[in-house]
Image (cartoon, helix red, strand yellow):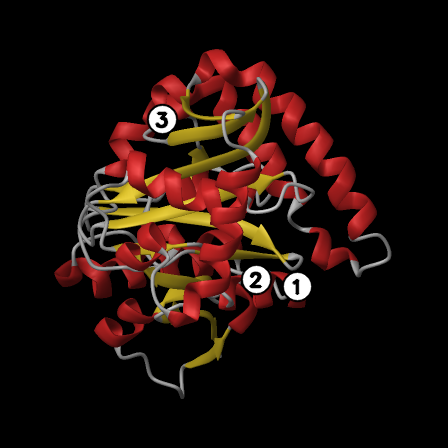
Amino acid sequence: MELKFDKITAKITEKLTAYYCLRDNNTCDSVFMGEYLWKDYFEIRYAISEETHALHYIMKADGRIYAAVPYCAPENLAAAWEEIREYFHKNLGRKLAVYLADETSLDLMNLSEEQYEITELRDAEDYLYNAQALKTLSGKKLHKKKNHLNAFLKEQEGHYQYRSLCCSDASEVWEFLKQWKVQKDEHYAGLPEEEKELDGEILGVHDVLTSCSLLDVRMAGIYIDGKLEAFTLGSYNERLCMAVIHIEKANPQIRGLYQFINQQFLLHEYKDAVLVNREDDVGIEELRQAKMSYNPIGLAKKYRILER
C-alpha cells in the first residue's frame, strides 16, 4: 500500500495523537503539538500506514525533504522504517533522510553506520527538568530564580492574576505576541537568519488560537493591572508524565515574571508531571544560558540520519 501524505489539520488531532503514546520518547516531538505548531513553517505532511500501524511525517528543512522517525509500537518500528525508506526511493527518487530522530528510536533500531550517517544535533536537543524542582525552586542551584520570584510577588502584590486561557482570549494573546515580537526583533537585530527561526512559532501559535477547542493544549497568562504581560502554552506526554512547554513569553522589563509564569503553569495545569521538557535553544547562546540556569537534569538528544 503506497503512503499518501496530507496536510495536518486540527480536526485530525485525536486520530494522530493515538500514535504518540506507543513507545517512549522524551523529546518535544513526543506530543502532537510538537508537529502542529510547526506544520506550516516546515510544510509538514502526514500519512498513516495500515500495514505497519504507523504514523509517518515528511517535512522540509535546510532545503531538503526529511522524514520523521515513524510513530508506532517498538515491534513495528523496523518495518515502518523500511516503509518510509522505500517511499523515499520510489516516490521521491532519493535516499532516506530523517530529521530530529530521538535517542530511544536509535537504540531500538541499531542502525548500521555503514548504511547510515548519524549526526547528533546539539542545537535541537531539548532541556529536561525535574518537575518538582521547577514547582518549588528550592535548593542552592535555583536560589537566584527563587529570589526573582519573591521580588515579583513583593513588587506586584495585589496587581497580578494567573489565568488559564482558551480560544475566547485569542485577541488578547495575539496583541501580546505582536508586542513581544517587536521587542524580540529589536533584540536579535543583526543575528544570522537561522537564529531568527523562532518567528515560526508565532505562526504556529496564531493557528492554535483559531483552533484550540479541537487541540489537546493548555494555555495560561499572567495579567498585571488587567493587561496580559506573559503567555505560555504546553501539552502533556501521559506515558512519561512529562509536561512539554512549547511557548513561554513574558515582558522582560518585569522582574521575576518569567519565573512566576514558569512555576504557576506547572502548579495549575500539570500537577502530576514528574518531568518537564522546555524544548531546545535553537543554538542561540542567550537562550542556552537561560535554559541551563534552571539546572536541567539532562538533554533529550536528537539526530539527523542520512542514508549513505
Name the residue located 47 percent from the left edge and 48 percent from the top edge: 150
Q: Of residues 14 and 173, which is closer to you in this image?
A: 173
- Residue extending farthest to the bottom is 114
The image position of residue 103, as x and y in percent, is: 33, 71
Amino acid type at circle 1 is Glu
At mark 1, the secondary structure is helix
Label 3 environment density (alpha carbons within 10 Å; few <14, some 14–19, many ≥20): many
- Visible in this render: residue 286? yes
Name the residue located 53 percent from the left edge and 42 percent from the top edge: 152
Q: What's the CA distance linking mark 3 and mark 2?
A: 29 Å
Instruction: Give the residue pinned by disc 3.
Output: 215
User: Do the CB atoms of the residues marked 3 and 1 lie less than 8 Å apart?
Assistant: no
The image position of residue 85, as x and y in percent, is: 38, 62
Instruction: Give the residue pinned by disc 1.
Output: 286
Give the mark, 3 or 2, whose residue is nearer the N terminus.
Answer: 3
Q: What's the CA distance linking mark 3 and mark 1?
A: 31 Å
Give the mark, 3 or 1, whose residue is nearer the N terminus.
Answer: 3
Q: Of residues 211 and 133, which is closer to you in this image?
A: 133
Location of residue 108 with respect to 175 vertically, above or below: below
Q: Of residues 203 and 254, which is closer to you in this image?
A: 254
At mark 2, the secondary structure is helix
Name the residue located 22 percent from the left edge and 61 percent from the top edge: 77
Judge left or right: residue 43 versus residue 268.
Answer: right
Instruction: Give the residue pinned by disc 2.
Output: 290
Amino acid type at circle 3 is Leu
Judge left or right: residue 119 versus residue 255.
Answer: left
Label 1 environment density (alpha carbons within 10 Å; few <14, some 14–19, many ≥20): few
